[in-house]
């Protein structure tokens, strides 16, 4: 009788099994590229455009997918909290890189990371929305929640991750702690210490790895450095200069943290400086300012003007200059609205009303002056694209009509400005000189307008009109140069000389081109006359769809606006065969069979048998 199978002794171990049992299983170290994971998630899901709501929703959706894939759910009916500890971090996904280096990742670490990111993005969403006192309390609570999850993430990475992952997680946690302390404004020194720790880690990590990783570390350092500078200035007690604060203003998720603080410090600084500002000077006249809001608005505009016209103005890109102009216009419009409010409440006090009217006129004149400067910047941008050929990016080329429109605006602006200054009171020497200068500039703008209007006519093949406009522009430029012989603005005089030379050269070109076209007219007429037929035959037009087999152009000449011969429209009539007429003549001769026996007979009742 054989022994049951469950009672059989185990087989003896092989040599391989004995060796494997004697060796200890190596500790798996997880690797998470924290900075790359964070930057990719943020840039692809809303933070490229500052949309924190979209990024928070992405983090929530990502967490749901991770919970479901790991079966790390929190109960079905009742919520059961499940903590992530060191023993929980066991899930492994295996990857093999091109360098034949095996790395291990844990999705449990991703859960902790996205919990921190979700709390941080929620706090930033409340911050950018302009929180009130109650919303600020909620925002600080979400920042604390982000610090809690970031600290747990750093702790788990230090226990289960490799050295690089541990360093990146530590830098991430330090950044979150510094963000909370920076927002609370209670311990600026501790916030600066955390930001410095973050910078030190990324400086070391930026020395190694791929080019992409070094670039990411460099970008992170550039985001942290303004915060360190802001904290050091706050701790040093030195007055924050407006220029230094404007240098800190950049774009990105990190800069949204202290954007409101910079605005608050700037407004405080302007209020302090506005206390000593009692009057506004313009063209030799001084106007007293009594309203504090008007002072702050004018001071803000003057600081922006100094930044725009400073020594480093050449290094400022054109789009940045246009943004500064928009801020200047906004500040001056705020000042004008305050002045109008003061005028409405001034009553019948003639002295106060005269001072406010003079201040309003001066601010309007400065606003018109800056508008001319902005339109001149737009003209310079358009001119740079006017002679440029299309590059690989298929950049749009400026048409001469666009420059004509811009010069129309400049002429109107100079007219309005000179009318504003010359109206009302007696003019002083500075105002007369200013009016004379801008009358000369108006003539120069008219000459430029004629030049580009001639370019527009030349592009359509109208040689006579283009030649006349070039000559008119040259005469305006020459007359302006005669009046500006003793002018100190050498650049303006040089631009007029260049315009005069261009007008002469282009008028000669148009004259020569017109003569050549006139000389070729008889030849073209003779060719056309030779093709004229006295019969009823019409001139045959070749269309592209009719000659697809032959390589012939269906376009007109480049200098004339002729229609392209692609297809005939409306299409010509074509003969279509009619449907045949069928005459059924055999119908009357056919004798059909009797089928009454197949028809259903109607049943009759008892009474219908008698009465039919």
Image: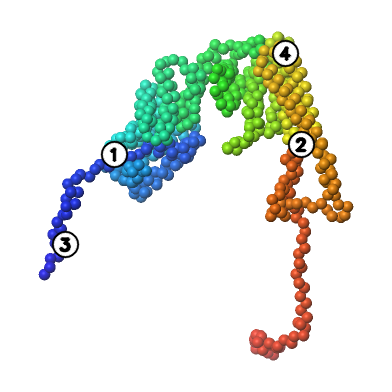
Pick whichever of labels 3 and 4 is earlier in the sequence. 3
Q: CA distance from mark 4 to mark 1?
A: 80 Å
The reply to whether discs 1 and 2 touch (Cβ–Cβ < 8 Å) is no
Can you give x and y, in whole percent of width and height, for residue 490 in the image?
66, 15
Q: Nearer the viewer, mark 3 or mark 4?
A: 4
Distance, label 3 to label 4, CA atoms, is 117 Å
Horizontal and vertical percent for residue 132?
47, 29
Question: Mark 1 or mark 3: which comes first in sequence?
Answer: 3
Of callouts 4 and 1, the N-terminal one: 1
Q: Earlier in the sequence, mark 2 or mark 3?
A: 3
Residue 28: image x %, image y %? 27, 42
Q: Earlier in the sequence, mark 2 or mark 4?
A: 2
Name the residue beneath numbered marker 4. Answer: 485
Task: Left or right? Give the position of 451 relative to 292.
Answer: right
- Quarter-of-image position of residue 391: top right
Residue at image mark 2: 461
Q: Quadrant of the C terminus?
A: bottom right
């Amino acid at each position: 009788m054989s022994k049951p199978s469950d009672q059989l002794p185990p087989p003896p171990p092989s040599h391989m099994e004995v060796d494997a049992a004697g060796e200890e299983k190596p500790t798996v170290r997880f690797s998470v590229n924290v900075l790359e994971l964070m930057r990719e998630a943020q840039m692809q899901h809303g933070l490229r455009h500052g949309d924190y709501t979209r990024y928070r929703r992405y983090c929530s959706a990502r967490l749901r997918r991770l919970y479901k894939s790991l079966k790390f759910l929190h109960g079905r009916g009742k919520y059961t909290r499940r903590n992530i500890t060191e023993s929980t971090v066991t899930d492994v996904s295996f990857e093999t890189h091109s360098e034949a280096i095996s790395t291990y990742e844990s999705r449990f670490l991703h859960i902790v990371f996205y919990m921190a990111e979700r709390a941080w993005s929620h706090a930033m969403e409340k911050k950018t929305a302009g929180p009130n006192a109650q919303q600020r309390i909620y925002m600080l609570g979400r920042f604390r929640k982000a610090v809690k999850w970031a600290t747990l993430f750093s702790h788990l990475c230090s226990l289960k991750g490799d050295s690089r992952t541990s360093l990146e997680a530590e830098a991430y946690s330090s950044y979150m702690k510094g963000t909370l302390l920076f927002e609370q404004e209670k311990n600026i020194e501790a916030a600066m210490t955390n930001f410095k720790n973050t910078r030190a880690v990324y400086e070391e990590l930026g020395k190694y790895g791929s080019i992409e990783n070094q670039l990411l570390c460099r970008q992170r350092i550039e985001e942290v450095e303004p915060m360190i500078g802001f904290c050091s200035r706050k701790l040093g007690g030195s007055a924050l200069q407006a220029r230094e604060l404007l240098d800190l203003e950049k774009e990105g998720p990190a800069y949204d943290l202290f954007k409101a603080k910079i605005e608050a410090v700037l407004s405080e600084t302007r209020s302090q400086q506005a206390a000593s500002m009692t009057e506004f000077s313009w063209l030799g006249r001084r106007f007293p300012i009594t309203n504090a809001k008007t002072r702050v608005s004018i001071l803000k505009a003057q600081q922006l003007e100094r930044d725009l016209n400073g020594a480093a103005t050449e290094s400022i890109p054109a789009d940045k200059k246009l943004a500064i102009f928009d801020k200047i216009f906004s500040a001056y419009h705020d000042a004008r609205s305050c002045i109008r409010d003061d005028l409405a409440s001034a009553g019948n006090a003639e002295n106060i009303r005269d001072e406010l009217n003079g201040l309003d006129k001066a601010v309007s004149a400065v606003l018109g002056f800056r508008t001319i400067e902005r339109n001149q910047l737009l003209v310079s941008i358009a001119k740079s694209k006017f002679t440029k050929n299309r590059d690989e990016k298929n950049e749009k080329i400026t048409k001469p009509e666009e420059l004509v429109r811009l010069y129309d605006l400049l002429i109107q602006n100079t007219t309005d400005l000179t009318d504003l200054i010359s109206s009302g009171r007696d003019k002083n020497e500075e105002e007369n000189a200013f009016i004379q200068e801008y009358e000369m500039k108006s003539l120069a703008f008219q000459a430029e307008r004629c030049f580009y209007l001639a370019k527009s006519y030349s592009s359509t093949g109208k040689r006579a009109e283009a030649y006349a406009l070039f000559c008119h522009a040259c005469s305006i430029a020459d007359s302006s140069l005669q009046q500006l012989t003793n002018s100190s603005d050498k650049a303006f005089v040089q631009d007029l000389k260049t315009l005069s030379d261009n007008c002469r050269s282009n008028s000669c070109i148009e004259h020569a081109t017109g003569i050549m076209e006139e000389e070729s007219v008889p030849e073209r007429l003779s060719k056309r006359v030779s093709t004229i037929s006295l019969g009823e035959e019409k001139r045959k037009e070749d269309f592209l769809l009719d000659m697809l087999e032959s390589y012939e152009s269906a376009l007109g000449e480049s200098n004339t606006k002729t229609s392209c011969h692609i297809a005939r429209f409306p299409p010509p009539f074509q003969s279509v065969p009619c449907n045949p007429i069928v005459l059924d003549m055999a119908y009357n001769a056919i004798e059909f069979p009797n089928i009454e026996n197949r028809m259903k007979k109607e049943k009759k009742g008892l009474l219908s048998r008698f009465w039919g």
